[in-house]
Amino acid sequence: MAGSGVKVLGSWSSPYSNRVQITLNLKSIDYEFIEENFYMSNKSERLVEANPVHKKIPVLIHDEKAISESLVILQYIDEAWTSNGPTILPSDPYDRAIARFWASYIDDKWFPWLKELEKASGDEGAIVGNIFEGLMVLEEAFVKCSKGKDYFGGDNIGYIDVVLGSYLGWIKVIETGFGLNLLDETRIPGLTRWAQRFCSHDAAKDVVPQTDKLVQFFMMVQATKTNSSSG
Amino acid sequence: MAEVQVYGVWCSAFVRRVEMGLKMKRVEYEYIEEDLKNKSDLLLKYNPIYKKVPVMLHNRNVLVESLIILEYIDEVWEGPPILPKDPYERARARFLAKFIDDKLPSMWKACWSAGEEREKLIVETREALKILENELKGKKFFGGDSIGLVDITANFIAGWFLGLHESVGLQIMTQENFPNLMKWAEEYSGNSFIKENMPDKEKLVAHYKILKTGAQS
């Protein structure tokens, strides 16, 4: 019954939405993708109804039930579809705890540093330092978790891969915009090669957005913000 | 060495969550009190990234972050379930637990701030509490008839938040505006099993009075 009544309210530009799409692709689950203009202040009725608490994407709708928060959705997909290939979370409880830990580190500690850069507060040096330090931490995590294989999840893409991999589009935008070489093979060889593998994987290659498209999108959103705040 | 060890501080709601999970599953553990002003080498070794409590050791496994630890406890040990069985209900529980955790900092700040900032935080806190209030409609606990992940995560509200109300003289959450939550808090704190797992109220209130004087000086 894969695919019956599965919808994703999301956006091509959102890493949180991308990770849901990638996970559904990994599990070969058919879904209808509904693009939401999440960056506008007036959200669609459909989005507000599906996610009244946060009014944010992504939202997964399955059998008319709505699930929000990307990490919650990823775990739901793992638990609701049990005969669609390997789980993205490991089966061992301790390995699962490690996977959840790194997902939380990436989302709550590391990626916010990249968002700080965008704010251009004048503190760029320190922020870039933190970003690089974080990448070294993640490189070490990759070595430990992958155990010499292609992904954090081992032979297959797993939870941490999807969480970090969904940011790759924006990481490249930051590299371009700030002239940084974040995915530097000399500093973080494991992650650099992992990033290439991830972006070319069937489940991710049509989901992780192209850099130039994202840059255009970013400029458009900035212009919208400027227009709405002036006058 | 005990099979399970918990590093914590007596006044932390996050630490108490982990202890609650272990107690529910009737798991024996050794508790080690940390001094956060003078963190032990072991704590820094086990949690180098965040340097925080709780830290739980199970045999050679090192675990940090209270919600992650609770999921681990549920998966490793038999006994009353912390999370529901149904995938959608599990997703709902995780969503609400995250929601509570995300709102905790402003709830906490609302108790200590003043003026315009305080008014703003109180509005934000009440909006968050309203969502939890609605969630409790017709239910004894967030988990239904028995406590679950969301109840344990909300322990801050039952013990600490209401404790602060008393010591600082707050009116953010009252019987009038949040009757379901107040009833839930009473049930949660009144349950003798849970009572053992809450810090002594008077000790907590006294601790906060000192903190508040310190914060103002």
Image (cartoon, coloured by chain):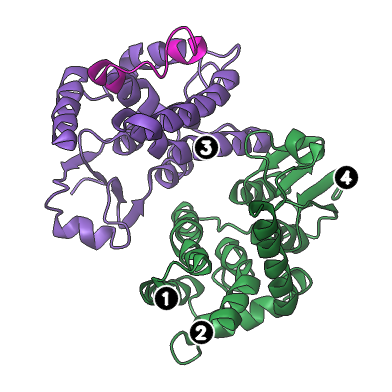
Chain colours: A green, B purple
* Residue at disc 3, secondary structure: helix
Q: Find disc 3 in the rendering and name its residue.
A: B99
Q: Position of residue B178 (x, y in %)?
A: 49, 13
Q: Is residue B193 magenta?
A: no
Q: Which one is nearer the viewer's eye here, B211 or B67?
A: B211
Residue A133 vs residue A190: left or right?
left
Q: CA distance from mark 2 to mark 1?
A: 9 Å
Farthest front residue in view: A231
Residue A19 visible in the snapshot:
no
Q: Are marks 4 and 3 in contact (CB under 8 Å)?
A: no
Q: Which residue is mark 1?
A: A128
Q: Are marks 4 and 2 in contact (CB under 8 Å)?
A: no
Q: Which residues are magenta?
A: B164-182
The answer to whether marks 4 and 3 sit on the same chain is: no
* Residue found at x 30% / y 48%: B56
Picture mark count: 4
Q: Whole-percent x and y of residue A5? A: 86, 43
- List x then y, in percent, for residue A207: 75, 68
Front-lying residue, B1 or B39: B39
From the viewer's side, name the closer residue of B181 and B168.
Answer: B168
Quadrant of the rendered image containing residue B160:
top left
**Alpha carbon of mark 2 to alpha carbon of mark 3: how far?**
35 Å
Check disc 2 and report its element: helix, strand or loop: loop
Name the residue tied to disc 4: A4
Mark 3–mark 1 Cα distance, whole angstroms, equals 30 Å
Which one is in front in this view, the residue at disc 3 or the one at disc 1?
Answer: 1
Q: Is residue B178 magenta?
A: yes
User: Which amino acid does the dot numbered 3 rest on?
Assistant: Phe
Label 1 resides on the chain identified as A
> Marks 4 and 3, Cα distance to the nearest angstrom?
29 Å
